[in-house]
Image (cartoon, rainbow, N blue to C red):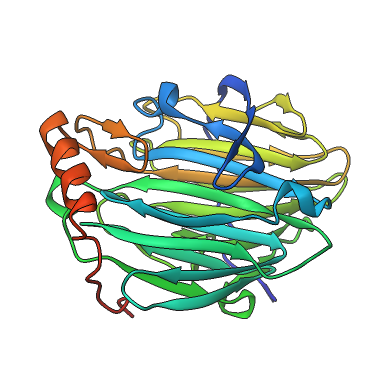
Amino acid sequence: MNTVQTIETVERPRSVEQIVQGVATSDGAGVKLTRVLGQPLQQRLDPFLMLDAFGSDDPQDYIAGFPDHPHRGFETVTYMLAGRMRHRDSAGHEGLLQSGGVQWMVAGQGVIHSEIPEQQDGTMEGFQLWLNLPARSKMTPPWYRDIPRERIPEYATPSGATVRVIAGASNGVAGAMQREGTEPLYLDIALPAGSSFDSRIPATHNAFVFVYRGAAQVGGRRIGTGRMGILSNAGDADGVQLSADGAARLILIAGKPIGEPIVQYGPFVMNTKEQIFQAINDFREGRFAEAIDAPE
């Protein structure tokens, strides 16, 4: 871990527009999870389509995992806080996602994959984020990359905050992934009691935080465990300010809106109903197989 020398100062922080509580649900073969961001918020939080939080030490809540299922038209970002998950896909790719690591997959024109736990007991905890693709990229060949814990940049601030930079850049530290077009920022932030953290965010970007341990003050408003705070889009705001009276952990996510129609049918996200019908037909006829290697 490095101590950052370039500290960003936020002078006009964003406020919290809305606090959202996720909805308990299940997916895959019965994996219990909380859907924090779903279809009702997709336009507001463009380019983000979904955020699921999962976490349990009961194997019955996760052991069946996510058997073979298709995707088209977006990217999935799975961040594992604890546990082991095996990925296999229709293009012959395979990888093991472990504690502290990230799997970044571009479904593009279509891929079938599975995510199955490789553990019989213990805690499995993490997040899956869906990031939309612009129309011009929705039919790109699919690819995926496993990013182990040690390849995710991490730094400490003078006030004691610890920050993992999964995507984008923070306080001069470039993240493990950079994506053009949507320019996502994805930070995992640990705030010790009495600490604070500032992060610059372009005024054009939509942004939110999700607190998964303790409670944090965001733009002067308290957000407790299991709550998402949607940050306001004031045109003169230059970032977000976070602080915590007690120890807290949260993720901060931001991205540049695409501004295109969003049409979703289950695991397919396109721009028109006709494209959805085509996706269903292509899947049924076995055209979700070809892929390319992940870019460096």
> Is residue 202 something that shows in the picture?
yes
- Quadrant where the N terminus sits is bottom right
Q: Is residue 152 left or right of residue 190?
A: left
Please say if 250 is above or below 234.
Answer: below
Q: Is residue 158 left or right of residue 167?
A: right
Q: Nearer the viewer, residue 104 or 223?
A: 104
Q: Nearer the viewer, residue 105 or 256?
A: 105
Please say if 180 is above or below 251.
Answer: below
Q: Position of residue 171 (x, y in %)?
A: 54, 60
> Which residue appears at 63% of the width and 28% of the height?
22
Please say if 253 is above or below 99.
Answer: above
Q: Is residue 247 left or right of residue 45?
A: right
Q: Nearer the viewer, residue 188 or 111?
A: 111
Q: Position of residue 198 (x, y in %)?
A: 61, 46
> Which residue appears at 42% of the width and 73% of the height?
145
| Outermost residue to the front | 285
Q: Quadrant of residue 233?
A: top left
Q: Position of residue 288 (x, y in %)?
A: 24, 61
> Is residue 233 something that shows in the picture?
no
> Which residue appears at 56% of the width and 78% of the height?
151
- Quadrant where the C terminus sits is bottom left
Q: Is residue 96 left or right of residue 174?
A: right
Q: How many marks?
A: 0
Q: Nearer the viewer, residue 36 or 222?
A: 36
Q: Position of residue 220 (x, y in %)?
A: 69, 25
> Which residue appears at 51% of the width and 45% of the height?
253
